[in-house]
């Protein structure tokens, strides 16, 4: 089914998980732990080496056993997969590599049986260049209504041979590509903030708004509990599409990209009207559905604008994700997060890993100066993570995160302590970042390697045929789920225990109070009757009286060692 096809019969599915009277303030998403599934790397039932929906359905019980509340599926829609599915050719169909709509329905039903909610990914900033609208735009020529659904402009220079402005693509190179007109002459340019295969929609055109309302309703009718919204700070571009410096940003494009607030393609005020509209669409449906913004904007007070009470419900807390393992910085980002989000009536969210950043088990093992998302590990970098240190700190960081009030996001494989896979042959790398930067940046393949389930099975249980779209390193055997299942002290059991206590004591709906007296190097707070102590100092910490519920690593001589978090009932 294509985006602008004539209306087809819609299937409306009752969503028992989401029905019931709305009670503002007690919606499930305020405290939920949401597990991100990256479909191509989770579980492959077909055996072609690419994960699929049927594979996910088979493995869902392990997520219910982990204790999460919901799953968010990265895109599984029809797509040429130039950006691993974030280049959507048909928003209302499943790509054959992942299965069919019937497979999606089966996944949704199984999730419901297991008490898991399902969130899907919506990619509204751009489509694939294979989308029927873009193909129609190419065929229709300049000035046509078909072109007006995207961002086509004439070029500069005598013959239009220069791009319309100096905007760069996030993935490297220019954000403009010139097309050949239907008559064979070099023609207009189209904007693509990401890869050239991902043309940006024109959100000033009401037709685009109408189409996305249709897409939202298609999936809501199919019973989804909500949407993670890709590039939610994009969509609207500054009127006139000025050069970066003209719009007030640095004229050094590299600097401008580091302060995304100042660039004319992000965070334009008109974008909020789109989310007010979508809020109303979700409100047409029973129960509590959620919109979660992927908006890389800082400071947090600005990100909170995306979750005002009539807009989205949650926004990813990328400031938290990017905070180095330093007690004073952690205290201040936690304070800032809670103040910013609760200030607009939204829960704070917490996240440490996703499919776009270096896995936190490796990030925390890098020297502090390189510990930034999406960077630090590349061919030009001498810094390779200290794996043991990274995992040790990652466990402490997770134990801290899961004790915080609000909603938390987990990324598949972090519950196994998986590291970033750094050593991949260049020819297997698929991330457009790698190719568009001429290999200068490794990009994100390292956090997307298919995850291990059984240490002795082909492809570690990812795929029965042993095939895997990115090669899995031999060391994945020791991280496999079956090696950790039921093993005291394993990372998997740490996650399970933390999630169980979190649920039992309703920590997600709790509140945080800082506790003094443990020294500058200890992040110490209470959430309800739980005292959380994260020792980032060099010396071990004597624990106060209380029932020890959990430690991220074992105590040493009864004391809390460095880089370790403890939960005590007091
Ligand atoms: C953000 C997604 O998380 C990322 O994976 C993707 O490449 C870009 N948006 C473009 O859609």
Image (cartoon, helix red, strand yellow):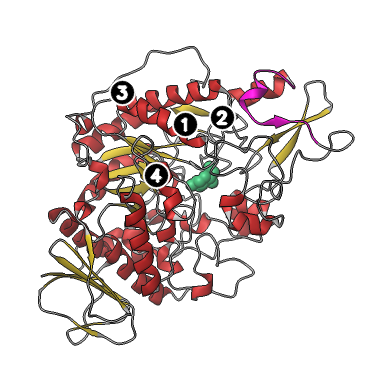
Q: Distance between the residues labelled 3 and 4?
A: 36 Å
Q: Cβ–Cβ below 8 Å for labels 3 and 2? A: no
> At x 19% / y 87%, what residue is drawn?
557
Element carrying mark 3: loop
Q: Distance between the residues labelled 2 and 1?
A: 9 Å
In terms of sequence position, does the residue under pointer 4 or pointer 2 come before the other? 4
Q: Pinpoint residue 470: horizontal percent, then vertical percent.
A: 51, 53
> Is disc 2 placed on a helix, strand or loop?
loop
Gap between marks 3 and 1, in whole Å? 16 Å
Task: Please give the range of residues in magenta.
Answer: 142-155
Q: Residue at x 50, y 49 (%)?
A: 469
**Residue 95 appears in the rendering:** no
Q: Which of labels 1 and 4 is toward the front?
A: 1
* Residue at which label 2 appears: 203
The residue beneath circle 4 is: 44
For the C terminus, the quadrant is bottom left
Residue 330's quadrant in the figure? Answer: bottom left
In the image, 291 versus 122, the foreground residue is 291
């Amino acid at each position: 089914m294509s985006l602008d096809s004539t209306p087809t019969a819609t299937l409306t599915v009752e969503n028992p998980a989401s029905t019931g009277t709305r009670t503002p303030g007690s919606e499930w998403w305020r405290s939920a732990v949401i597990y991100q599934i990256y479909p191509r790397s989770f579980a492959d039932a077909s055996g072609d080496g690419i994960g699929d929906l049927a594979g996910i359905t088979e493995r869902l019980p392990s997520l219910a056993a982990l204790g999460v509340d919901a799953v968010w599926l990265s895109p599984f829609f029809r797509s040429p997969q130039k950006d691993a599915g974030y280049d959507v050719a048909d928003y209302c169909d499943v790509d054959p590599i992942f299965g069919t709509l019937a497979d999606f329905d089966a996944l949704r039903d199984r999730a419901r049986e297991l008490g898991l909610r399902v969130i899907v990914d919506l990619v509204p900033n751009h489509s694939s260049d294979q989308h029927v609208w873009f193909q129609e735009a190419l065929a229709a020529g300049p000035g046509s209504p078909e072109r007006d659904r995207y961002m086509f402009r004439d070029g500069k220079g005598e013959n239009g041979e220069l791009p319309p402005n100096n905007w760069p693509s996030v993935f490297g190179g220019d954000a403009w590509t010139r097309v050949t007109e239907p008559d064979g002459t070099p023609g207009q340019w189209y904007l693509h903030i990401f890869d050239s295969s991902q043309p940006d929609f024109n959100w000033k055109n009401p037709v685009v708004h109408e189409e996305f309302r249709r897409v939202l309703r298609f999936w809501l009718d199919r019973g989804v509990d909500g949407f993670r919204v890709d590039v939610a700070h994009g969509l609207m571009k500054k009127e006139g599409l000025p050069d970066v410096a003209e719009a007030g940003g640095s004229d050094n494009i590299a600097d401008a990209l580091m302060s995304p607030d100042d660039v004319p393609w992000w965070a334009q005020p008109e974008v909020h009207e789109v989310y007010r509209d979508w809020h109303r669409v979700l409100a047409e449906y029973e129960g509590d559905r959620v919109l979660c913004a992927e908006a890389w904007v800082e400071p947090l007070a600005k990100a909170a604008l995306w979750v005002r009470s009539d807009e989205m419900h949650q926004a990813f807390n990328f400031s938290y994700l990017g905070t180095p393992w330093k007690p004073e910085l952690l205290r201040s980002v936690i304070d800032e997060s809670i103040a910013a989000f609760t200030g607009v009536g939204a829960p704070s969210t917490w996240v440490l890993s996703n499919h776009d950043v270096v896995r936190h088990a490796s990030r925390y093992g890098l020297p502090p100066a390189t510990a930034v998302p999406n960077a630090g590990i590349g061919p030009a970098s001498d810094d390779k993570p200290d794996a043991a240190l990274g995992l040790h700190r990652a466990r402490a960081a997770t134990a801290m995160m899961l004790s915080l009030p609000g909603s938390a996001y987990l990324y598949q494989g972090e519950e196994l302590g998986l590291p970033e896979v750094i050593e991949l042959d260049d020819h297997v790398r698929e991330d457009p970042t790698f190719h568009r930067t001429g290999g200068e940046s490794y990009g994100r393949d390292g956090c997307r390697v298919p995850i291990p389930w059984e240490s002795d099975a082909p492809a570690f249980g990812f795929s029965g045929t042993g095939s895997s779209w990115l090669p899995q390193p031999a060391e994945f055997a020791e991280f496999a789920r079956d090696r950790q299942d039921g093993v005291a002290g394993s990372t998997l059991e740490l996650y399970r225990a933390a999630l169980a206590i979190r649920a039992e004591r309703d920590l997600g709906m709790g509140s945080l109070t800082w506790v003094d007296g443990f020294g500058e190097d200890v992040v110490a707070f209470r959430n309800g009757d739980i005292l959380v102590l994260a020792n980032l100092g060099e010396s071990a910490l004597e624990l106060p009286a209380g029932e020890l519920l959990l430690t991220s690593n074992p105590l040493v001589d009864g004391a809390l060692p460095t880089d370790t978090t403890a939960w005590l009932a007091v």
